Image (cartoon, grey):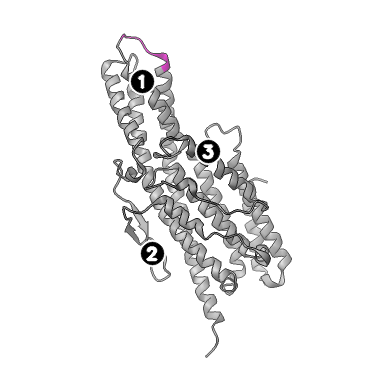
Amino acid sequence: MPATDYHASFLGRLSIRRNQVIAMDGNHEQELEDLELFSKHVSECFTELLSPPDDVPFDTLLSIPWLRKLLDVFLCCEAEFKAIIMMGNDSFQISKPPLDRLIPDLLDRSVKALDICNAVTNGLDSVRHYQKLAEIAASALEQKPIGDGQARRAKKALNSLMLAMSIDDKDCSAVKTTERSWSFSRRGVNKDRSPGHFRQVAKSWSAAKQIQTMACNLVPPRGAEASGLASPVYIMSVIMVFVMWALVAAIPCQDRNGLLATHFPVPKQLNWDQSIIGLHEKIGEEWKKKEKKGAAGLLAEMQKMEKLGHNLMEFTESFQFHGETDEKAAAHAAELAETCRRMEEGLLPLQVKIREVFHRIVRTRTEFLHALDQGGKSSAPLV
């Protein structure tokens, strides 16, 4: 069954159960079945991300289409997770152990995820800057025949591109981007304030440390908790940390040194973990291949752009006008232009998708805070 059909079927089934107002404590077998289906769906979604279909040539690991699929998976899993936890709108359920401890941890993790979303959105400005420089070079080198003026123009653009892409992580935000580096304030998602209250991020803020903080208290449920609602909370936490980690690995962000050291404490006996572990390992391998430690990000289109840029730099540096077209350089220029075209088509939808994830996290966090507050009131002793 396709992921979208499975998603609709899963949520429809939970909706029926909610309308029937079946108490979860009295229907433990049904609850276990739903949890098993949720973990199975998570496994299927991430397995497809690990091994995308061969008939999609540009849907490679850490490409723009791949990242959009990753965010779609996050949104899909998040909706199913919330449906399980909030079944029957039973606010008292999440105010009882162990959810009274685990849900606040998840909400704290979600605030850090909002910071990551903002940092990645800001990093996309750098990616657009790289794209524009590459477009200038490709346009100049697509002229037939190439003259001295076109070669000089392409060389200048390529020099700027290579310099911009080699800037150290801590200076990534300074690469001719819009000055809007923001961090999400905790007060901005407080139930007493409207979402979207921002403060400017400090220069000492680190994307890698933010991710590591999100993962540091991520502990798998044990004993009886492993078969209850603690399990989907843990699964959703792992998904959130992994998705944010992958975004930071792909897109330029402020200070990503040490990102590769992020540890995902996922027990190997679980049925949904292997695909996430596999993706973590594959992305880690790509990171290690970069001598610059991924300074400009591992976005597949940027990797392609950088490789073609180096090839074309060699051509422009040794260029001598002779009235003929260099076929190899022309092919590289055409490939660079095609890469820029795909980026032009994909960057805005990716930014929109990140914004959708941002607002979904805000909305879910608000709903859980409200449920915790209501659960606390309902469990309070009468005076």
The secondary structure making up most of the magenta span is loop
- Left or right of 191, for residue 82: right
Whole-Å distance between the Cαs marked 2 and 3?
37 Å
Query: Does any portion of residue 372 appear in the rendered image?
Result: yes
Report, in whole angstroms, how far the alpha carbon at label 3 lies from the one at label 1: 28 Å
The kind of residue on which mark 2 rests is: Gly
Residue placed at 38% from the left, 47% from the top? 255
Local secondary structure at mark 2: helix
Q: Nearer the viewer, mark 3 or mark 1?
A: 3
Q: Earlier in the sequence, mark 1 or mark 2?
A: 2
Q: Which residue position is annotated with label 3? A: 285
Q: Residue at x 67, y 65 (%)?
A: 223
Q: Residues within 10 Å of mark 3 (few under 14, many from 20)?
A: few
Foreground label between 1 and 2:
1
Segment tinted magenta in the rendering: 322-328
Q: Which residue matches tag 2?
A: 188
Q: Earlier in the sequence, mark 3 or mark 1?
A: 3
- Any magenta on residue 192? no
Residue 157 sits above or below residue 349 on the image: above
Answer few, some or many: residues within 10 Å of disc 1's Cα (few below 14, many 20 plus, some between 14 and 19): few
Nearer the camera: disc 2 or disc 3: 3
Residue that badge 1 annotates: 314
Residue 237 percent location from the top left of the image:
54, 57
- Check disc 3 and give the amino acid type: Glu
Q: Identify which residue is drawn at 59% across, 38% down.
A: 52
Q: First in sequence, mark 2 or 3: give its number.
A: 2
Task: Report the amino acid beneath label 1.
Answer: Glu
Which residue is outermost to the right? 29
Q: How many marks?
A: 3
The kind of secondary structure element at disc 1 is: helix
Whether residue 5 is visible, yes or no, is no
Q: Is residue 145 above or below residue 362?
A: above
